[in-house]
Amino acid sequence: MSETHGTVHWTELNTHDVDKAIAYYTKLCGWSFDKMPMEGADYHIAMKGDQMVAGMFDLAAMPEMKDLPSHWLTYLAVDDVDAAAKDTEALGGTIIRAPWDVEGVGRIAILTDPSGAAFGMMTPS
């Protein structure tokens, strides 16, 4: 296993009010935001100075997620997201969204652990 396998790699806010969230985190944390086009919506990168600290997108832009409440989602780095997704099922978790590729980012899956907690896994590119 690599040194980063199993570490927290990224976190993102999935929200129904991007403007309100940007205003809040700008004032609370001193973040600025860079907009990045994403299929179906813009993805907002939260910056603390020159460091990327989180991402954010509008849940309403994702039809399969539009009814979810706003929430933070954490992504764990894994060496092989496909194998880790299979291992998750074998260990009593669930695959919510099977692994898929995001150009320039990596391969991602959304799962729940055996307790029902949702999280993402990513093999960074």
Image (cartoon, rainbow, N blue to C red):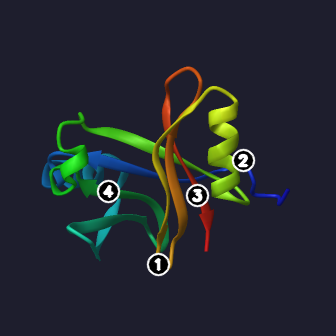
User: Callout 4: helix, strand or loop?
Assistant: strand
Location of residue 26 in the rendering, given as x and y in whole percent from the top left corner: 27, 55
| Sequence-first disc among 2 and 4 | 2
Location of residue 24 in the rendering, given as x and y in whole percent from the top left corner: 23, 47
| Sequence-first disc among 3 and 2 | 2
| Sequence-first disc among 1 and 2 | 2
User: Callout 1: helix, strand or loop?
Assistant: loop
| Sequence-first disc among 3 and 1 | 1
What residue sits right under mark 4 in the picture?
A: 56
What residue sits right under mark 2 in the picture?
A: 6
Amino acid under label 1?
A: Glu
Q: Would you say residue 24 is visible in this rendering?
A: no
Q: Tell me the distance, in whole angstroms, between the alpha carbons under discs 1 and 2.
A: 22 Å
**10 Å crowding of disc 4: few (<14), some (14-19), many (20+):** many
User: On the image, which quarter does residue 31 sit in?
Assistant: bottom left
What residue sits right under mark 3 in the picture?
A: 122
Numbered mark located on residue 103 in the image: 1
